[in-house]
Amino acid sequence: MAMAFRSKAKFNFVNGKIQKPQEDDLTFPDWDRCNITVSCWLMNSVSLSIRPSISRFNTTLEMWKDLQDRFSKTDFSRISDIQEEIYLLKQGDLNISDYYTKIRTLWDEFDDLRPIPECQCAIKCQCKALKVIAEYYESDKIIRFLKGLNPAYA
């Protein structure tokens, strides 16, 4: 969604950088028109069951914050399912490209749910701990990929 809003130069409505002007402000009609347009895009992009819960908001910013609060929670059940799928995945009858694509899709979804944090040090990080963790993640991926290959490829 963020990418779609950026492509239309409207992301600042959902991130709060363009704030609602006073109704007597000369820019209010333009802001209101854009807010309604972006709100409609947002409403049309969510499932029918979600629409009523965000339609009560007056601004796109409020809608976006509600959706963000609702869907940005870590889904431990899904993380567990992905981990299990990764560990049980075998190449089987898949060609190597299809097998890689399947496991890569699982890794990408896992990375989205559990991203490696960025260092918050004020000065350039000296300990390199996050770099080492990222390298461990990558080596884990290689190990899982190789472990799932048919013996003929291993």
Image (tube, rainbow, N blue to C red):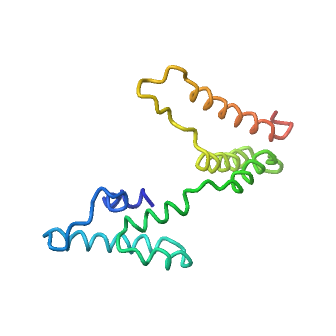
The residue at 36%/57% (across/down) is 15
Q: Nearer the viewer, residue 3 or 76?
A: 76
x%, y% of residue 83? 74, 47
Q: Nearer the viewer, residue 95 or 111?
A: 111
The answer to whether 77 is drawn above or below residue 24 in the figure is above
Give the side of residue 56 with respect to residue 89, left or right: left
| Quadrant position of the C terminus in the picture | top right
- Reply above or below: 26 against 104: below
Viewer-side residue, 120 vs 85:
120
Relative placement, left or right, of 18 versus 85 is left
Which quadrant is home to the N terminus?
A: bottom left
Q: Nearer the viewer, residue 97 or 146?
A: 146
Which residue does the image show at 46% across and 29% down from the upper left? 121
Q: Image quarter for residue 75?
A: bottom right
Q: How many circles with numbers are drawn on the protein?
A: 0
Splitting the image into 4 quarters, where does residue 139 fall? top right
In the rendered structure, the answer to whether residue 103 lies left or right of residue 3 reads right
Residue sitting farthest toward the right: 151
Q: Position of residue 44 (x, y in %)?
A: 45, 75
Q: Residue furthest left?
A: 26
